[in-house]
Amino acid sequence: MLPAAENRAAANCRSASGSKPAATSATPASSASNTRLPPTRRSTGPPPEPPPSKHRARRRHHSRQASAPDTSKRIRKMTNVAVIGLGIMGLPMAKNLVKAGHQVTGYNRSQEKVDKLVAEGGKGAASVAEAVKDADVVITMVPDSPDVEAVVTGDDGVFANAREGALWIDFSTIRPDVAVQLAESARKAGLKPLDAPVSGGEAGAIDGVLSIMVGGEAADFDSASEVFDAVGKTIVHVGPAGSGQTVKAANQLIVAANIQALSEAVVFLEAYGVDTAAALKVLGGGLAGSKVLDQKGQKMLDRSFEPGFRLKLHHKDLNIVTSAAREAGVTIPLGAVVAQLVGSMVNQGDGDLDHSGLFKLVEQLSGRDND
């Protein structure tokens, strides 16, 4: 290594000749902005603690394609995961957890879904208690607030049988006030609760690219990163317990309004004999473009409404958001109308259709359902 004086002279000489100075351990402070490489983790020890920040709780707002999150603060890797509820969303999420290297034990009321998980390398359990007894992370993914309460409470439930210190992640969509109450009960039982409803439908669950809005303690959110990364792409900590469910309610309001608007647009286009496939393509490239258009437009054109997310579940979600809006003193006139339209579909017996099946009602109201 050159002495400091000689090193400075050499650097000045190279700079004067127009060539880029080589990076050395003795780079002078005056030229650091031009020569210093981005900082990397030293091999002699862990990186220094970042300064405290009021925004620290949100630092996991990221894409799965981003660089791997810092794991230096994790106490241990969580590999034993119990998944309660292997439905349209829960089963593909459980499969992705298996693919990510976790040991996954599933429980579902119908054995067929458990068998499908086992075929993918997971394990099956005959009860909730059996599924959660050795789990580092317990996941619930069931339809509604009463269903979550049923699987977490009681002698055979999660709270009575999960080991102390385990994380409980509720991926279900339920009422925010119920999420808060259950989080308090979970903490009393020695668990670490997170409400983490998801958006993206069955396709997002299969591809592992769900959007996940998480409520709970920031430290618990950080420690669950390996699980979240296995099933989601956009993962955001949105506040304390119940916040995830509040954001999900807003999400369902936006999605429902988009489905209604898209349904009306397709019926309108068809009434004028427009090439609807071409129309949706160009609309999707402009300001009218949305994931709803991308994922649901063709289903409407094909009149194919196999469930990815059932109307009856969206009906439940819209009841949540309209009720919560009343409690908050907030007016959502468009949301209230769409909630009534979705409710009418469910009352007519179409609750098991995909929520894009709302298109059928728009056709009926336009007198074009037999065309």
Image (tube, rainbow, N blue to C red):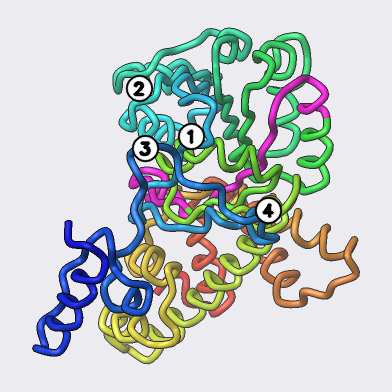
Q: Pointer 4: what residue? A: 317
User: Of callouts 3 and 2, which one flags the residue occurring earlier in the amino acid sequence?
Assistant: 3
> In front: mark 3 or mark 1?
3
Around disc 4, counting alpha carbons within 10 Å, would you say few (fewer than 14), some (14 to 19), or many (20 or more)? Answer: many
How many discs mark residues in the rendered view? 4
Residue at x 15% of width, y 75% of height:
10
Around disc 2, counting alpha carbons within 10 Å, would you say few (fewer than 14), some (14 to 19), or many (20 or more)? Answer: some
Separation (CA) of disc 2 from disc 4: 28 Å
User: Are the residues tagged 2 and 1 within 8 Å (C-beta)?
Assistant: no
User: Of callouts 2 and 1, which one flags the residue occurring earlier in the amino acid sequence?
Assistant: 1
The amino acid type, in three-letter code, at marker 1 is: Gly
Q: Pointer 1: what residue? A: 90
User: Are the residues tagged 2 and 4 within 8 Å (C-beta)?
Assistant: no
Q: Pointer 3: what residue? A: 44
User: Are the residues tagged 3 and 4 within 8 Å (C-beta)?
Assistant: no
The amino acid type, in three-letter code, at marker 3 is: Thr
206 lies left or right of 216? left
Provide residue 350's location: percent of width, then percent of height.
Answer: 56, 51
Around disc 3, counting alpha carbons within 10 Å, would you say few (fewer than 14), some (14 to 19), or many (20 or more)? Answer: few
Range of the magenta residues?
A: 185-210
Is residue 341 magenta-colored?
A: no
User: Of callouts 4 and 1, which one flags the residue occurring earlier in the amino acid sequence?
Assistant: 1
